[in-house]
């Protein structure tokens, strides 16, 4: 045995005590080898586990349903059979990780989320030094269709960070009513444990600390804002906390909702209302007696309400009390029960993002509305008012309403009446027990006016659709996009719910964001958004089953399956649900309803190949598979993102093309043009160099219309606001103004046939993206995919042919390398080919030769190694090459 004496330390530090170490070098080397071996054996991959249980035969899931984390001594398994509570498995047995948050749903105790409707897992990071798994689930809900007691604020996110030595750090974050508690890291339960051959050891739990994290707002200068002595006054100048002071009685009242949004106001601070949950409730017993009265306040709208929304009211809707609010077009309404339900509505419409002084008076003879000190309307009302005994509410309705201007108003299943609030800022609320005169109101406005700088620049986020920061690289990242504060805080998602894919040679992006219910979007440099919709099924009652109806993204989710320089693969899973949560075409025997698994194989050239799998107890082929949809942020219109009047849509095959537009009152019908002609290509004429394209084998289609034939008042096209972003339970709201995030339809394209199908599923494939190609260039891309060059002369492997669903040739290696020829031609061109090489045992990247010439790694050769679903390694190669002649390839 070799012994090493370490004495150099004393030479350098003679004043310190000498230690002589005798260290067995063999032991050191052995420990180093063991550490390297443990690191090499740490890996995670997606798979689908079968354990022979009866329910597995009916499972409507694809090949990436589960996750295995492999360590040297065993496997940590995240399996559907436990609703993803992980199990540690070794040759000595299996042990479940502690269920710290108790779960109870519609399944058995071991699988409480029977069909994993609200449970999902994803690999955030997988390397030799650590593996990071995220598990998201709803701990409690009740069975039924729709499922009951589903609270989107109760979702739990757990993260497991696994080290090569088997040590695990687990963090558990449970949903909270207040957003401050959700984002506070101290409100996280932590557990550590070690995975050993004979079990899970050293388990230590550190409970969460329930501490809120609020900051104080410093508002604008405080002004005199009220004329005379008010009977009730709320100035909202606290700037922090969850309560507001009523100055006359000195009582404090709770600000209800996800957060108390303190903003700079007209004077001091103001409160923002989120459009859905925000409100302040003052008990009726705390209110002064009223006969004649005045209501006065300052308001700045962020968006117009879905229907009538109150600024302040004490009412039983259309029966008793008073109501001062705003309608869906921005008109101010003052309503009062005085012999009958009197409604005074101004012709004046409130502007957006601008402070406005509003006063309503009742003097025993008439109701009046004043805006910025000037009278805007009056209505005779002479009978004694009948006041409500309900509480006074600031900012939110107490009576459920359906949205204004709905599609198919006759369909009760399509629009569930709902409560919602004002979307904007409110400041300086005052209630007087007398009617102020016009002169007093004008004086009140004058003394409270803070200047145009404050009035025209309210403390409110701009609402620009988020596409995330750019790196200038071909990357796919989990992230958390922010839209605007009051909307962002309505849900409870962690930092890894969103995926953004960007490119190094194409300025477009693919965005999988919860604001779109994770419906994948393509965006260009002008921030113009587009998508090709989803699977949609119908109910005889009239409502549609679609992911758009998953308003809070309780079910819809995305996962990053592959992330190599050669390509990014994203899996989007969603259910076809109605707006009331009913799952479409429920099979009572199996409990399964309609689901979809869509895969996006995204390559460096900006092209995504979609493998779309749809499961249904009905005929999945009869459901909708495509609709061309534009998405617009507030202020955008179909006319601003696309040329509505000139070649809006171009459809083409390999020989002919034809364009359509909305320049006439009704767009030209296209069905007859493509009833017998093949159709493979669509391009939407966006006002950008980079335009949306779609490629597949279609059998015709139709230009988009509307269920009731109505268009937006400001556009030639039909525009909707129920999706995206919108949280009201409605599957169709027509836009009145361009004040909200909205969408419009261009075409429906019908598939010629399914590429694959089974007993209760069908699969179809599609190419999509945004690029600067002409129709002729798109024809080449389409031909390379629909009519790929034949792979011949394969040596050293076995060919599985061209897999259209992933836009790749699939090969299994049998020797050290493979070589082959792609028989490119004019009719079968080669366009940016990719190769999936299975059984790649070397663990190293490949050397590539094309026609005998070596291709260096970089932009001309992009490759990566993935762990396939069977645990073997697979090489993925992409090369940007265009050829119309036979081309030889060699991979070693």
Image (cartoon, rainbow, N blue to C red):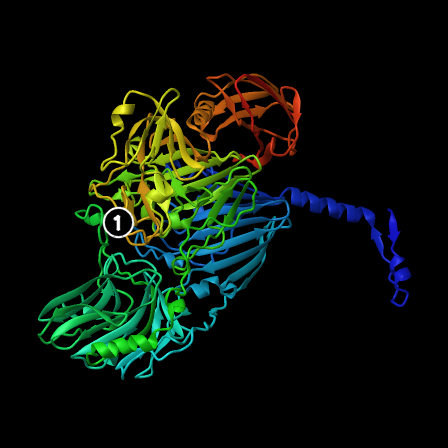
- Please indicate whether residue 155 sits to the left or right of residue 703 in the image: right
- Please indicate whether residue 197 sits to the left or right of residue 143 in the image: right
Q: Position of residue 38 (x, y in %)?
A: 66, 45
Q: Position of residue 860 (x, y in %)?
A: 60, 31
- Please indicate whether residue 723 sits to the left or right of residue 174 in the image: left
Residue drawn 45% across the image and 55% down it: 482
Residue 759: image quadrant is: top left
* Residue to which mark 1 is pinned: 733
Callout 1: SS: loop
Residue drawn 30% across the image and 83% down it: 248
**791 up-or-down from 33: above or below:** above
Q: Position of residue 398 (x, y in %)?
A: 24, 65
- From this viewpoint, is residue 534 visible? no
- From this viewpoint, is residue 692 visible? yes
Q: Position of residue 267 (x, y in %)?
A: 38, 75
**888 up-or-down from 633: above or below:** above
Q: Front-most of 510 and 398? A: 510
Residue 889: image quadrant is: top right
Residue 644: image quadrant is: top left
- Please indicate whether residue 117 sits to the left or right of residue 419 in the image: right
Mark 1 closeness class: few <14, some 14–19, many ≥20 residues within 10 Å: many
Q: Front-most of 506 and 348? A: 348
Residue drawn 29% across the image and 40% down it: 589
Q: Looking at the rendering, in which quadrant would you find the C terminus?
A: top right
- Number of dots carrying numbers: 1
**297 up-or-down from 228: above or below:** above
Q: Front-most of 139 and 491? A: 491
């Amino acid at each position: 045995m070799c012994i090493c004496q370490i004495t150099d330390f004393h030479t350098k530090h003679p004043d310190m005590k000498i230690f002589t170490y005798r260290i067995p070098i063999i032991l050191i080397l052995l420990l180093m080898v063991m550490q390297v071996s443990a690191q090499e054996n740490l890996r995670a991959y997606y798979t689908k586990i079968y354990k022979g249980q009866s329910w597995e035969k009916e499972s409507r899931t694809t090949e990436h349903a589960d996750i295995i984390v492999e360590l040297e001594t065993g496997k940590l398994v995240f399996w559907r059979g436990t609703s993803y509570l992980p199990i540690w498995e070794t040759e000595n047995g299996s042990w479940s990780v502690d269920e710290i948050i108790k779960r109870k749903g519609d399944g058995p105790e071991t699988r409480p989320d029977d069909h994993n409707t609200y449970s999902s897992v994803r690999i955030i990071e997988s390397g030799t030094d650590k593996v990071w798994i995220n598990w998201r689930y709803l701990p409690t809900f009740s069975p039924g269709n729709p499922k009951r007691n589903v609270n989107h604020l109760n979702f739990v996110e757990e993260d497991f960070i696994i080290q090569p030595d088997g040590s695990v750090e687990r963090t558990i974050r449970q949903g909270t009513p207040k957003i401050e508690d959700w984002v506070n890291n101290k409100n996280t339960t932590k557990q550590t444990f070690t995975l050993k051959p004979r079990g899970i050891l050293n388990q230590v739990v550190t409970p969460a600390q329930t501490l809120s994290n609020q900051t104080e707002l410093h508002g604008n200068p405080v002004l005199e804002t009220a004329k005379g002595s008010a009977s009730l006054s709320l100035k909202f100048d606290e700037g922090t906390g969850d309560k507001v002071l009523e100055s006359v009685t000195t009582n404090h009242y709770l600000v209800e909702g996800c957060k108390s949004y303190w903003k700079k106001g007209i004077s001091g601070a103001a409160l923002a209302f989120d459009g859905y949950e925000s409100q302040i409730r003052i008990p009726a017993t705390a209110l002064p007696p009223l006969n004649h009265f005045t209501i006065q306040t300052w308001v700045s709208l962020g968006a117009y309400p879905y229907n009538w929304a109150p600024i302040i009211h004490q009412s039983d809707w259309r029966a008793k009390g008073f109501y001062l609010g705003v309608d869906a077009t921005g008109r101010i309404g003052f309503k009062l029960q005085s012999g009958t339900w009197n409604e005074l509505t101004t012709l004046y419409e409130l502007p957006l993002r601008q402070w406005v002084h509003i006063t309503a008076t009742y003097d025993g003879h008439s109701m009046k509305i004043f805006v910025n000190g000037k009278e805007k309307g009056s209505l005779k009302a002479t009978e004694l008012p009948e006041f409500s005994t309900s509480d006074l509410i600031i900012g939110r309705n107490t009576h459920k309403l359906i949205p204004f201007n709905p599609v198919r108003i006759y369909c009760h299943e399509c629009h569930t009446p709902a409560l919602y609030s004002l979307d904007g800022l409110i400041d300086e609320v005052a209630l007087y027990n007398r009617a102020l005169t016009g002169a007093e109101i004008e004086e009140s406005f004058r003394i409270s006016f803070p200047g145009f700088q404050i009035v025209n620049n309210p403390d409110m986020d701009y609402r620009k659709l988020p596409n995330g920061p750019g790196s200038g690289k071909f990357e796919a990242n989990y992230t958390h996009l922010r839209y605007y504060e009051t909307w962002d805080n309505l849900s409870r998602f962690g930092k890894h719910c969103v995926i953004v894919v960007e490119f190094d040679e194409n300025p477009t992006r693919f965005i999988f964001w919860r604001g779109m219910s994770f419906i994948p979007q393509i965006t260009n440099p002008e921030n113009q958004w587009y998508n090709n919709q989803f699977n949609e099924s119908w109910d005889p009652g009239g409502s549609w089953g679609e992911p758009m109806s998953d308003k809070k993204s309780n079910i819809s989710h995305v996962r990053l399956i592959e992330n190599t320089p050669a390509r990014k693969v994203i899996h989007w899973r969603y259910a076809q649900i109605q707006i009331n949560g009913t799952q479409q075409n429920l099979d009572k025997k199996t409990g399964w309803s309609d689901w979809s698994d869509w895969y996006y194989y995204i390559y460096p050239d900006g092209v995504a190949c979609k493998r779309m799998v749809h499961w249904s107890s009905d005929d999945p082929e009869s459901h909708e598979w495509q609709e061309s949809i534009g998405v617009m942020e507030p202020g955008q219109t179909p006319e601003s993102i696309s040329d509505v009047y000139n070649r809006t849509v171009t459809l083409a095959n390999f020989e002919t093309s034809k364009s359509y537009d909305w320049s006439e009152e009704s767009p030209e019908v296209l069905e007859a043009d493509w009833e017998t002609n093949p159709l493979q290509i669509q391009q939407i004429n966006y006002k950008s160099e980079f335009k949306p394209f779609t490629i597949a084998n279609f059998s015709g289609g139709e230009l988009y219309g509307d269920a009731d034939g109505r268009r937006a008042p400001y556009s030639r096209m039909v525009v909707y606001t129920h999706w995206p972003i919108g949280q009201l339970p409605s599957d169709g709201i027509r836009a009145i103004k361009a004040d909200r995030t909205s969408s419009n339809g261009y075409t429906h394209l019908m598939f010629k046939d399914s590429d694959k199908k089974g007993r209760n599923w069908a699969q179809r494939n599609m190419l999509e993206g945004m690029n600067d190609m002409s129709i002729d260039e798109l024809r080449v891309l389409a031909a390379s995919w629909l009519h790929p060059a034949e792979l011949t002369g394969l040596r050293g492997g076995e060919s599985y042919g061209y897999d259209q669903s992933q836009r790749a040739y699939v090969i299994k290696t049998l020797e050290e390398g493979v070589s082959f020829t792609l028989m490119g031609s004019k009719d079968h061109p080669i366009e940016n080919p990719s190769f999936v090489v299975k059984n790649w045992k070397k663990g190293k990247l490949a050397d590539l030769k094309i026609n005998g010439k070596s291709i260096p790694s970089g932009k001309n050769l992009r490759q990566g190694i993935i762990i396939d679903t069977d645990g073997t390694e697979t090489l993925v190669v992409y090369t940007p090459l265009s050829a119309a002649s036979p081309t030889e390839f060699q991979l070693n």
